[in-house]
Amino acid sequence: MEFTARQIATFLHGEVVGNQEVIINSVSKIEEGIPGTLTFLANPKYNSYLYETKASVVLINKSLVLEKEVEPTLIRVENAYDALAKLMEIYVQSIPVKTGIEMPSFINSSATVDSDTYVGAFAYLDEGVKIGKNVQIYPHCFVGKNVEIEDNTVLFSGVKVYPECKIGKNCILHSGVVIGSDGFGFAPEKDGTYKKLHQIGNVIIHNDVEIGANTTIDCATMGSTIIRSGVKIDNLVQIAHNVDVGENTVMAAFVGVSGSSKIGKNCIFGGQAGVAGHLKIGNNVTLGGKTGASNDIEDNKILMGEWGMDASKFRRVYAVFRNLPDLYKDLYQLRREVKNLKAE
Amino acid sequence: MEFTARQIATFLHGEVVGNQEVIINSVSKIEEGIPGTLTFLANPKYNSYLYETKASVVLINKSLVLEKEVEPTLIRVENAYDALAKLMEIYVQSIPVKTGIEMPSFINSSATVDSDTYVGAFAYLDEGVKIGKNVQIYPHCFVGKNVEIEDNTVLFSGVKVYPECKIGKNCILHSGVVIGSDGFGFAPEKDGTYKKLHQIGNVIIHNDVEIGANTTIDCATMGSTIIRSGVKIDNLVQIAHNVDVGENTVMAAFVGVSGSSKIGKNCIFGGQAGVAGHLKIGNNVTLGGKTGASNDIEDNKILMGEWGMDASKFRRVYAVFRNLPDLYKDLYQLRREVKNLKAE
Amino acid sequence: MEFTARQIATFLHGEVVGNQEVIINSVSKIEEGIPGTLTFLANPKYNSYLYETKASVVLINKSLVLEKEVEPTLIRVENAYDALAKLMEIYVQSIPVKTGIEMPSFINSSATVDSDTYVGAFAYLDEGVKIGKNVQIYPHCFVGKNVEIEDNTVLFSGVKVYPECKIGKNCILHSGVVIGSDGFGFAPEKDGTYKKLHQIGNVIIHNDVEIGANTTIDCATMGSTIIRSGVKIDNLVQIAHNVDVGENTVMAAFVGVSGSSKIGKNCIFGGQAGVAGHLKIGNNVTLGGKTGASNDIEDNKILMGEWGMDASKFRRVYAVFRNLPDLYKDLYQLRREVKNLKAE
């Protein structure tokens, strides 16, 4: 698709400075600066690139004061970042969505699939599956018995959903996601072996949830593992059996939540953070990267460190920790001084 | 399926208190308490729920003394938890198992598949593959050349098994598991590039092993990576080339074991623990969550912390660590005092 | 395949000691010592096995001085390890490579596939895909719209490549790898929900890159996530949007690199290491296992510890850390002494 600077400015209610008829057919980062593309400048840190970029059109904030002349056409808007996000959304929506059923796919005769839905080749829909409107099920997805998937949800290639799980509206599950695998439950026997505790629960995913590639969410032992509306989960995250994740909570890559823990709303968990089992984590809790949580956490707390310390305390502890060799030297210097004093 | 309280009590050799004919068709957790379901009470922490639950039937320990009247029908058994596990096993066994070969699947003419086995649509069985009795191979599994899978083993959708690997009896491999991918072996060249060391070994998995979703187990450089009987591995675990995991060892999510390490029997590794390469870890070793092991470990040790310290020592170290700011203050207070003493 | 010791010695320009006509048909580790196999001895730590092994042929260094008589045939070469690597390469190259298009597979009519290429059953090649010479695409791979894959690259079973990504020559992508999934980008809204930032970039993988099983590499928000030539990535690694990984950098399992960080050439990242977002990591940087990097790092640095400390400093800090209980005791002993001095 091609657009002129004028067309884009009109769409964004922006003001063009320079050649209105210059044509762009893609976007690029300002430091890449590819001719024929549109870019943007929102972060003042990158201002200098404006005078070097070879991009054809740059979105800038109305408020930006130019230091010298620039080569590309400018489009001045209220907020360059928001304007770009709007353009990207339009761009993505302009990509034609697949519909219909590609062959060969496997759809059990008792499965119901809405007519606007895409079912890719080699997708597998088992007995009793119910698929809503405008759902996209890419190739190699497995949708187990009695699974329900509501409107506008997308399962990218290779998503696996075990039987009886439920997925809400407007969700996005990336490639390799596994939903509903058995919880890790074993009872130790006297001879040192383990007996499997059969896992008969499911996973329920509410609306507007996005789940990153190769993330795994286990089914409940009984009842449901629950991912509530608006939750955003990155790649390679592990959510164990019977966990309940509150609305709009965000988890970065390699976060692990152990069995039966209940996570509040609007939490943010940094990469490689871990939560032990059977805990209650409040609302608006932040765990820094690599943080371990092994106790219940109250609302609004920020924790850091392998042992989940309050962040402000952790920073004080760490300031001493990183200077331990000096502290050690000071202590033993002092010891000598005391020894001398005693000898006097 | 529906059962009366009486039918369940008979099956469990339990005693009914209340309406014997109440019908249940599912199970729930006692705190959820859904009418028409059976629940259980084993942990005294949850006793209060017994008087509030709306579940229709509750399994309780014979020894439990009621504090007041309860609404649901009770079934008194020797051990409520064991009775439940027994019911769950019966329930799972009641789910009909798929058999036969679904089309389209790809089975090389030289592969041998026992007649009771299930091969799902889009499964791929390469040359020389041997599949035992009652094996279930779900859709999208890849079973490479000469792989052998013994009786009663289940490969859920999307398991990938590289050529020449062997999987024993009664194993469960969850979706996305990769068995036999190349070990990570590269020889540095003088120009800074790396030369691949070809990996010609395989993976051997003994009996009664369960492997969680998206876990990866690399083949040996030469010889075999071995997972011994009764090992239970959670989701998203990494086992490198030539590792040997002893019987009944348990590993939680995100555990990583580096190349050629030998792990003993009956070990327990917590989530996000890591083991360096070429180590010998004894029997009955416990690694806490996030623990790093970078040295050999003797039998029966419990280690904690990023640097794999003996747990009792780690607790003492950590008790001081978390109070470092106070220690710092005390030290510099003391310094002032000594300075004053010296000045006297 | 079977070879005599004489044939192998001729190929390796080595010298046979013992029975030249002994036949081997496989390789084994010297401590396993299986009759009918060839093994090698390169590490002096394993010298004693030479006198016990039941292997039929052993590759040894020319320089090795025997302590007593040995049973197997020996082949003396300049460097036993290199000779073995050469044999393993020959062995791997002797395994017949699949070619042609297996059915049923799905190849869009606008996709171009070179005639020497293997496309396995149940593979999916979308619109505009371009596949070079001698490429192997195993069953269950998904190759999205307009993806280009250059000569000699291998995608093992179940690799997923999102639209518009590019993969160079001589690459190996192991099972379950996901290339080009959406970057993790969300803008917080006033009501606590998050708005998805659409991700319209791609992933570009240069030549000679190997990527381990179930590793995920996200597409760029705009522009490209770049993996440069010679990079070697282990299993279960996460590379976020807009990351740029320099030539010949090596990453072990569970490494996570956050969005927009730029990693230099010839770096080595240990297992479970993490790099925060928007950082610049120099060339030849080493991160120990479990190390966290939260600041830019200069060339040639070696970092250790959860908080990414210079390794030599970390070792000094840790030496004090592990003796904190003693330091604590010494401090409070000293306090008592000072108290006594003051009382005098």
Image (cartoon, coloured by chain):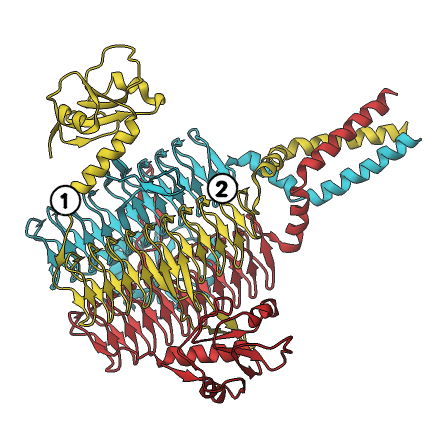
Chain colours: A yellow, B red, C cyan
Q: Residue furthest top?
A: A68
Residue B142, image x, y percentages: 25, 65
**Circle 1: is it few (<14), some (14-19), or many (20+) Cα within 10 Å?**
some
Q: Is label 2 on the same chain as label 1?
A: no
Amino acid under label 1? Asn
Give the CA distance from mark 2 to mark 1.
38 Å
Q: Label 2 belongs to which residue?
A: A288
Identify the residue at image location x=77%, y=40%.
Answer: C330
User: Does B265 sit above or below residue B241?
Assistant: below
Kindly tell me whether residue C7 is visible in this rendering.
yes
Asked where in the image residue A166 lies, by quadrant, the reply is: bottom left
Mark 2 secondary-structure assignment: loop
Asked where in the image residue C28 lies, by quadrant, the reply is: bottom left
Q: Residue furthest right?
A: C344
Q: Label 1 belongs to which residue?
A: C146
Placement of the N terminus of chain A among the 4 image quadrants:
top left
> Disc 2 or disc 1, which is closer to the eye?
2
**Circle 2: is it few (<14), some (14-19), or many (20+) Cα within 10 Å?**
many
Identify the residue at image location x=84%, y=32%.
Answer: A339
Residue B326, image x, y percentages: 70, 36
Kindly tell me whether residue C223 is visible in this rendering.
no
Asked if residue C131 lies left or right of residue A337, the reply is left
Identify the residue at image location x=24%, y=58%.
Answer: C157
Asked if residue B158 lies left or right of residue B53, the reply is left
Placement of the C terminus of chain A among the 4 image quadrants:
top right
Q: Nearer the viewer, residue A197 or B2?
A: B2
User: Does A328 sit above or below residue A270?
Assistant: above
Residue A122, image x, y percentages: 18, 62
Residue A160, image x, y percentages: 29, 61
Mark 1 secondary-structure assignment: loop
Amino acid under label 2? Gly
Q: Residue furthest left?
A: C109
